[in-house]
Amino acid sequence: MPDVGVLSAHLLSGFQKELFTRLAEAGHEHLRPRHGAVMAYISEDGTRASELSERSGQHKQVVGTLIDELERLGYVTRQPDPADRRAKLVVPTELGLDQMAQARRIIAEIEARLAELVGGARFAEFKKVFGEVARSYERD
C-alpha cells in the first residue's frame, strides 16, 4: 500500500483534473489548478491578499501573481477595503462568482460520487479523519 503522501498526491491530482476539466466545460477554460490558491479561499465579499496567502499556505508573492492573472482573466478585481482604505480587497467579479458557484456544484457531485463508491458513512468518516490529519500540518 502506498504511503499517505503518495495517496494524497493521487487524490489531489485526480480531483483537480476532474474539477478543472468540468469547469472548462462550464465555460471556465482559462483557469488552472494553481488559481485555486485564490479562488478556493476568496469570499464573495472580497478578501485581502494577505488572508488568501495565509488560508492557502502560499507565499504572498505567489498569491500576488495569481491575483494578477485572475484579474487579467476577468475573475477578480482589486478594490479599496472599506475597513482600511490603505488596504485592497480582492473581490470576485460576476465571472468569478459564477466559477465559485460552478466549483461548489461540481465538488458536491464529485463527493456524492465518491460517497456512493465507498458508502456514505465511510466517506463521511474518511473526510473527518482526513481533515484531522490535514489540520495537524497547519500547526507547523
Image: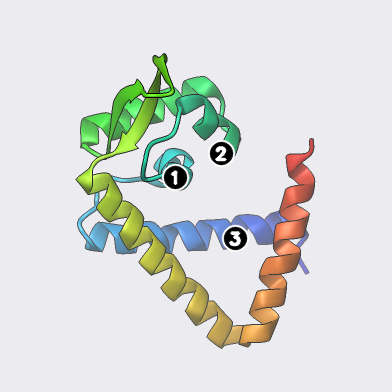
- Cα–Cα gap, marks 2 and 3: 19 Å
- Cα–Cα gap, marks 3 and 1: 17 Å
Q: Residue furthest front?
A: 83
Q: Earlier in the sequence, mark 2 or mark 3?
A: 3
In the figure, residue 71 lies in which quadrant? top left
Question: Mark 1 sits on what residue?
Answer: 36
Residue displayed at 77% across by 56% down: 133
CB contact under 8 Å: marks 1 and 2: yes
Question: Mark 3 sits on what residue?
Answer: 10
Place of residue 118 in the rendered image (x, y in percent of width and height, measured from the top left): 63, 85
- Cα–Cα gap, marks 1 and 2: 9 Å
Q: Is residue 91 left or right of residue 50?
A: left
**Pointer 3: residues within 10 angstroms few (<14), some, or many (20+)?**
few
Q: Is residue 45 left or right of residue 5?
A: left
Q: Nearer the viewer, residue 2 or 43?
A: 43
Place of residue 62 in the rendered image (x, y in percent of width and height, measured from the top left): 48, 26
Question: Mark 2 sits on what residue?
Answer: 56
Vertical arrangement, residue 119 with respect to residue 65, above or below: below
In the figure, residue 80 lies in which quadrant? top left
Query: Which amino acid type is marked by label 1?
Result: Gly
Q: Earlier in the sequence, mark 1 or mark 2?
A: 1
Total marks in image: 3
Q: Nearer the viewer, residue 136 or 85?
A: 85
Place of residue 59 in the rendered image (x, y in percent of width and height, measured from the top left): 56, 25
CB contact under 8 Å: marks 3 and 1: no
Local secondary structure at mark 1: helix
Query: Which amino acid type is marked by label 3?
Result: His
Vertical arrangement, residue 15 with respect to residue 121, above or below: above
Q: Earlier in the sequence, mark 3 or mark 1?
A: 3
Query: Which amino acid type is marked by label 2?
Result: Ser
